[in-house]
Amino acid sequence: MRVLMLSWEYPPQVVGGLGRHVAELSQALVEMGHEVHVLTGDVADAPAQETLRGVNVHRLKMYGPAGRDFVESVTHLNINMLEAALGLVRRGYVFDIIHSHDWLAAHAGKALKHGLMRPLIATIHATEFGRNHGLHNDLQRHISNLEWWLTYEAWKVICCSQYMRGEIQYIFQLPGDKIRVIPNGVNAEDFAVQEDFDRQSFRRLYAADDERIVYFVGRLVHEKGVDVLLEAVPLVLAEDQQVKFVIAGKGPAEYALRERAHHLGVSQKIYFAGFVDDSTRNRLYACADVAVVPSLYEPFGIVALEAMAAGVPVVVADTGGLSEVVKHAENGLRAYPGNPRSLADNILAYLKAPEFAAYIKERAAREVREKYNWSLVAAETSAVYQEVLQEFQNSPWTEADSFPADEILAKTRLTTQGAQARYQDTSSDPYPFQDPWESPEQLVGSRYLHSPRQYLSSSPKPKPERVSEGVRWLDPEEGGLS
């Protein structure tokens, strides 16, 4: 099977977990015998095209005017994805599946689905609604609409946890039979220290010899709950002074977090390590006594799997997909989300009971290797591909020579509950010459109109018909109940 993956990021460009997910999944699919091409953004010091562990990676340079904001830059990338896909098709490639990851590849995925007449799969890694605990401005609503659009256009939607299944069903009103839950995976060997190193000297870069290390790694944003961890620091230190908190990662919240640590009077017990490469990350895992994942929102929590694979006992927030990965007192500990006292108590539970910590990390490492490996993830994803191709071959799509086709549109467009509220068919909309707050007189002299009567009727609007059948109704003009 030939698969075209669309992803905003791909290693060595790694901003969040999406890029690593796409890379590991693509490589595992290649090992199964599939051919995978990945279209992604450009990154400095990386070739425009290369084959990495069998995956054909196409990095697309962003020629043209720079986007005014992030969303516009993403749209430009999607246009470049279309250009690259057309180039591959011109060279004779025929793809069986188009696979888009998140709204960042929605435009290209939808266009290629209809242009190439091939089924589209979407993976939703997180939602704008979930990240922000609601939609609070026009930008967030726009991104959420793009997410909905991608799930609507996709033949099947893949998510990483039962929690995410519920979230996207709630937000996008997706039918349950359209969603497939496939957990993330990790390569456990990627989180082991591959070379000998002076552990004591390395450890002294971050903590004193008599201090135990509590380790966090991730983006420094509100949803990751680092502020909750900071509030837990003085609670831990009140019972055990010989603890150092190492916070690795970067993000827009870094300076606010540093300031909060200063106000709490615990700056000397917190080391902000900034961005760390894979080797440094693994060495820190090797030196850590506890790993914490205090997220307020976490669709899956792959960082918890990474810590478990590295042999570090984990404390996670009891939220999202983390609740499905970590079973309390079996392969880790779960704290109440957003609760510094609960987080501190669970950290101290490991520090006060080394034998218990050793038992937990041994069980966790074994479970990761047996249950969360990329071979299983790729096998389940391949099964979804096969299912979709079978359905596609039995659908009206295979009988149509081009798109759009009326019989397909009639069967696929706007049949989902709530779709009408989000979908805008703008092709037949009249130009809105008059805004709701404008009067006809305000349009006189407009450069778009020769006279207001050309486009606007001065005849009174007909009163709405009363169709009550015994139900009280509101007359919008009279302002009363009838």
Image: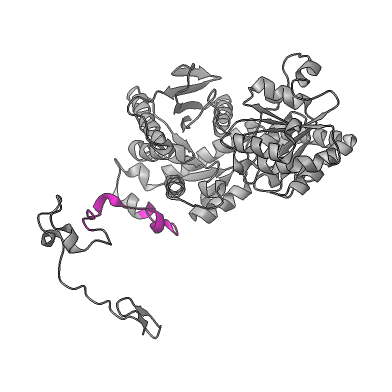
Q: Identify the main secondary structure in magenta.
A: loop
Q: Is residue 93 left or right of residue 288?
A: left
Residue 243, relative to residue 61: is it above or below? below
From the viewer's side, name the closer residue of 252 and 138.
Answer: 252
User: Is 398 one of the magenta-colored residues?
Assistant: no
Rendered image quadrant of residue 60: top left
Q: Residue at x 73, y 14 (%)?
A: 195
Q: Residue at x 42, y 47 (%)?
A: 142
Give x and y (percent) for residue 155.
Answer: 46, 45
From the viewer's side, name the closer residue of 46 and 121.
Answer: 46
- Tell me if residue 168 can be seen: yes
Q: Is residue 472 left or right of residue 314?
A: left
Residue 398, relative to residue 279: is it above or below? below
Residue 101, relative to residue 139: is it above or below? above
Identify the image's colour scheme: rainbow, by chain, secondary structure or one colour: one colour
From the viewer's side, name the closer residue of 238 and 429.
Answer: 238
Give x and y (percent) for residue 390.
Answer: 47, 42
Residue 160, relative to residue 16: is it above or below? below
Q: Quadrant of the C terminus?
A: bottom left
Give x and y (percent) for residue 463.
Answer: 25, 77
Rendered image quadrant of residue 158: top right
Give x and y (percent) for residue 168.
Answer: 53, 51
Number of numbered callouts drawn: 0
- Tell me if residue 175 can be seen: no
Numbered range of the magenta stretch: 411-434
User: Is 416 one of the magenta-colored residues?
Assistant: yes
Q: Is residue 367 left or right of residue 240?
A: left
